[in-house]
Amino acid sequence: MASDNDKITFVLVHGSWHDGSSWRFVEKHLHAAGHATLAPTLPGRGDSASMPITFQDCVDCVVDAVKAAGLSDIVLVGHSAGGSVVRKAAEMLADRIRRLVYISPLLAGNGEPVLAAVPPDYGALFKQMAEASPDNTVFPPWPVWRDGFIGDADEATAKAAFDELCPEPFGPIVEPIDLTTFETLQIPTSYINPTEDVVFPIGEWGFFPRMYHKVAPCRLVQIPGSHEVMYSNPEALAGALVVAGRD
Amino acid sequence: MASDNDKITFVLVHGSWHDGSSWRFVEKHLHAAGHATLAPTLPGRGDSASMPITFQDCVDCVVDAVKAAGLSDIVLVGHSAGGSVVRKAAEMLADRIRRLVYISPLLAGNGEPVLAAVPPDYGALFKQMAEASPDNTVFPPWPVWRDGFIGDADEATAKAAFDELCPEPFGPIVEPIDLTTFETLQIPTSYINPTEDVVFPIGEWGFFPRMYHKVAPCRLVQIPGSHEVMYSNPEALAGALVVAGRD
Amino acid sequence: MASDNDKITFVLVHGSWHDGSSWRFVEKHLHAAGHATLAPTLPGRGDSASMPITFQDCVDCVVDAVKAAGLSDIVLVGHSAGGSVVRKAAEMLADRIRRLVYISPLLAGNGEPVLAAVPPDYGALFKQMAEASPDNTVFPPWPVWRDGFIGDADEATAKAAFDELCPEPFGPIVEPIDLTTFETLQIPTSYINPTEDVVFPIGEWGFFPRMYHKVAPCRLVQIPGSHEVMYSNPEALAGALVVAGRD
C-alpha cells in the first residue's frame, strides 16, 4: 500500500531502436501500483523517421515533453543510449528532478559522443553498418538481438520485440556531448543492472560495472534479465524502478 | 505448456568424477516438462574404470551415443570438463546440433589440453595427485568438495553426491585438443553460470567470466548455485537448460 | 525440519556504528528456526561510548562473552569491521569454533590496521571526519547511508536504522593487528556476499570479490541485498547464515 508520498512520476526515455511504446508493459505495472509515467518517443523514428536529427533534438524532445506535461518532482529514467539523453536533459530539468535512474546506460565522458561508450570493435561495426545503410542508420541482426539483447525471453517475445524495432539514426550517436553543466549538478542517482545484460560481453567492456563506475557512488539495484528486460520481465523492471526511484 | 516445437532433446555430457547418472535429478524435471534427454557415461569410470582411455575415447563415446540413438536437432550440453568434450564432439555432430550449452565449462584454447584451463596452482596440485595415485587418477578431498564444489547443498546432499564420485583418469586432461575444425563451426551457443561456483575462486581464474569469454558473444543464463547445481538445485538447472537451449 | 545436529549456535559480531541490537531482526528468524544466538555489543558505544577503547578491547569483549556464556561449537560471524574482530578473537576461541562466517567483512593483512582494507580515498575521508569530530569518531552522512549502505530498503527502514547508529571510535580502526597466530589456524570458512553492497563501489575496491579473495578458497553464499541486509532483508540473511554456517 503506497502512501501518496510514495507515488512516483517516472519519465521513461528509451534507447536505440525503440520508441516510447517499448515501455508499455512496464508502465502497466507502474500504473497498477499507483505511479504515473510519461514515455516520449525520441525523434528520428516513427513519423520523423526520415528526418535528419541531432542529439540535441533528442534532448529537447524530453525537456519539452516534461515541461508540456507540467511535471515536477520526476524520476528521470534513461535506458541504454537514453542514459546519455537524460543526462543532457537534466541540465535543463534539474529543478524538476527528484532522482536520475539509469538502466544499463551508454554514458560517454564530457565532450565525447555516445559511441565512445561502445566497445571499440562494436563501434567499428556500427560505423560500417551505418555507412552500408541507405540512410545512415544502424540495426541489429536477428541472431545478435536474440542472444545478445534478449536472451532471457522466449522466442515469441524476442520476435515480437524485434518486429517493433526501427532503424536508429547514427548521427546523434557520433556527436560530442558537452556535459560541463551536468557535472556540476548533484542529483540523487540510482543504477539498475539487469544481470544477464550481455549486449557487450560481461568483463572489461560490459555495461556493468563499467557504466556504473561513471555514476558511482549511487544506489545500485540488480534484477535478473537481459538488456531488453522491459520486454522479457517488465514486472521485475517495474519493481526495480520503484526501488531505484523512491527517496 | 510447451508446444511440440518447444520440446528439446538434450544430450547431457558430465564433467570430471561423475558419470551419466549425475544428471538423473535434472532429467526428471526435464522429462516432466516434456523434453527428451540422453546422458552417456564417458569411458574411464564404472565398468571401464581400469582401462586406459584417451580424450578422443570420450569424444567418440558422445558421438556414438548420439548416432546410435538416431538423434538430431539436439541441444548438446557440457558441464565442466565435459565442455571440452562437447566442443570436439561437435565437429562430428555439427549437422545434428541445434545449440551448444555450456555449464561452467573447462575450455582450453586450440592445441591445448583441458588442464590449460585450470588455474596454475590447481593444475600443479592435480598433477601431484595423479602422480601420487596408483592409477594416474585425481579425486577431490572432502573439504574441497564440500565448500568449493557444492557449498550450496545441505550436508546430506553433499555427502550423497560425494559418495557417487569416481576417480577421474588424468590422461585425457593433459592431451592437447585440436579445435581447428570446431573453430570454423557457427553453432548458436548459450552459457549457464551458477553464480556461486567457486571451484576456482571468483576473480582472475574463476570460471565466470573467464570461460564465458572463450565463447562470447552468446546467450548468458545465470542461476544461483554451485558447480554441482545438478545435485544441489536440479529444478533450477533444468529450468536454466530450457532457457539456454530453446531457439 | 532441522535435526538437533542442525541446530547452530551463532555468535554475531556487528560492524561499525552498530551495536549488538542490530542483529535482532535476524535473530528472530534464527530463533524461529531453532538456532541459538549471542550478539555482544562491542565497547565504545552505548554505556561505554565516551571511554577510550582499543581493538583488543573489542576482541576481548567477544572472547569474554563466548566464555561467559559457556558456548562451544559456535559459528562465529563477523559483519564489516566485525570481520577483523572475529579473526583476532578466533585465536583465543579456536577450540570452540565450528566455522567462521564473514558478511562483507573489512579484512586487513597481518600487521595492518582495519583502515588498510578501506579504499584509499574513503580512508582519507574517514581520517578527516575523525579529526573534525570532538571525540575522534566517524559517522556516515545520511545520503551516503541511504544509497551506499542501505539502498535496498524503503526510506522508513533506512531512517529507522540510521537513527540507531552511534559514532564509531576511530582508534581501533587504525591499530595494526597481529594475525600471525590466526594464520596458522585452519577453521572452515564461509563468505556471505550481499550482491548490492556498494559501500565501496563494486569493482577494484568493492567488498566483493576483493575481501573474498582474502579468505578464499571457502564456501560462498550470495543473497540480494545491501551492506545493511540485517535491516533490509533479515529473513534472507538468516537463511544465508544457516547455509553458510552448517557443516
Image: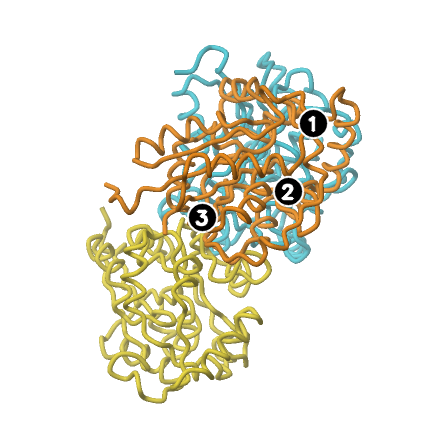
Chain colours: A orange, B cyan, C yellow
Q: Identify the amino acid type marked 2.
A: Met
What residue did someone put label 2 on?
A: B211
The image position of residue C206, as x and y in percent, is 53, 60
Residue A114 to residue C113: above or below: above
Q: CA distance from mark 2 to mark 1?
A: 43 Å
Residue A97 marker? 3
The image position of residue C87, as x and y in percent, is 43, 73
The answer to whether the residues at label 2 and label 1 have Cβ atoms under 8 Å apart is no
Depth check: give the residue in front, A47 or C242.
A47
Mark whose residue sits in front, 3 or 2: 3
Chain label for disc 3: A
The answer to whether any part of residue B146 appears in the image is no
Q: CA distance from mark 1 to mark 3?
A: 29 Å
Q: Identify the amino acid type marked 3.
A: Ile
Q: Is residue B33 left or right of residue B97?
A: left
Chain label for disc 2: B
Residue A52 marker? 1
The image position of residue B131, as x and y in percent, is 67, 53
Give the quadrant of the C terminus of chain B.
Answer: top right
Chain label for disc 1: A
Q: Identify the amino acid type marked 1.
A: Pro
Residue C215 to residue B16: above or below: below
Q: Secondary structure at mark 3?
A: strand
Depth check: give the residue in front, A72 or B58.
A72
Crowd tier of the residue under label 3, counting other residues whose Cα lies within 10 Å: few below 14, some 14–19, many 20 or above: many
Mark whose residue sits in front, 2 or 1: 1
Same subunit under labels 2 and 1? no
